[in-house]
Amino acid sequence: MSKYLIEGTYAADGAKGLLKQGGTSRHAQITAMVEGLGGSIEAFYWAFGESDFYIFADLPDNATAAAIGLTVSGSGAVRTRTTVLLTPEEIDQAQRRTVDYKAPGA
């Protein structure tokens, strides 16, 4: 499983739905969606600021993460942004790989 940070911002209709259903109801619905795709929610937070919520999720793969983003953002009620999260060990693996690259103009 890979870890993802999913940030979301509600459009006006989404905010109206949140006001009607409440935060715990939305959390339960999102958890059920993620678990139905073989994933799990590590943490879910509501926030003030540019994003309305932050979700830390374990998902089977990038295609699953993309499917969630496309479906949720496609509703028009929420705009999402998904970030792939890497563990320190994954960075160590990347650091050990040799990459043949020359910067432009080098």
Image (spheres, helix red, strand yellow):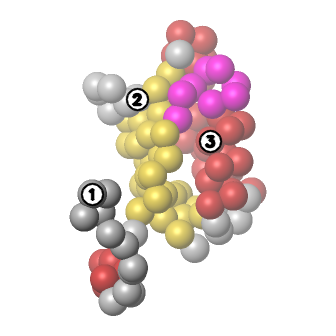
Q: CA distance from mark 1 to mark 3?
A: 37 Å
Q: Residue at x 70, y 25 (%)?
A: 75
Is 11 on the left or on the right of 69, as rendered? left
Q: Earlier in the sequence, mark 1 or mark 3?
A: 3
> Crowding near pointer 2: few (<14 within 10 Å), some, many (20+)?
some
Q: Residue at x 50, y 22 (%)?
A: 10
SS under mark 2? loop
SS under mark 3? helix
Viewer can see residue 29:
no
Numbered disc in front, either 2 or 3? 3
SS under mark 1? loop
Q: Residue at x 64, y 66 (%)?
A: 61
* Residue position for label 3: 69
The answer to whether residue 72 is above or below residue 32 is: above
* Residue position for label 2: 52
Q: Earlier in the sequence, mark 1 or mark 2?
A: 2
Q: Earlier in the sequence, mark 2 or mark 3?
A: 2
Residue at the limit of the structure toward the front, as seen here: 105
The answer to whether residue 42 is above or below residue 83 is: below
Residue 77 lies in magenta, yes or no?
yes
Residue at the limit of the structure toward the right, as seen here: 36
Query: Residues in magenta?
Result: 73-80
Q: CA distance from mark 2 to mark 3?
A: 15 Å
Viewer can see residue 30:
yes
The amino acid type of the residue labelled 3 equals Gly
Q: Quadrant of the C terminus?
A: bottom left
* Residue position for label 1: 105
> Crowding near pointer 1: few (<14 within 10 Å), some, many (20+)?
few
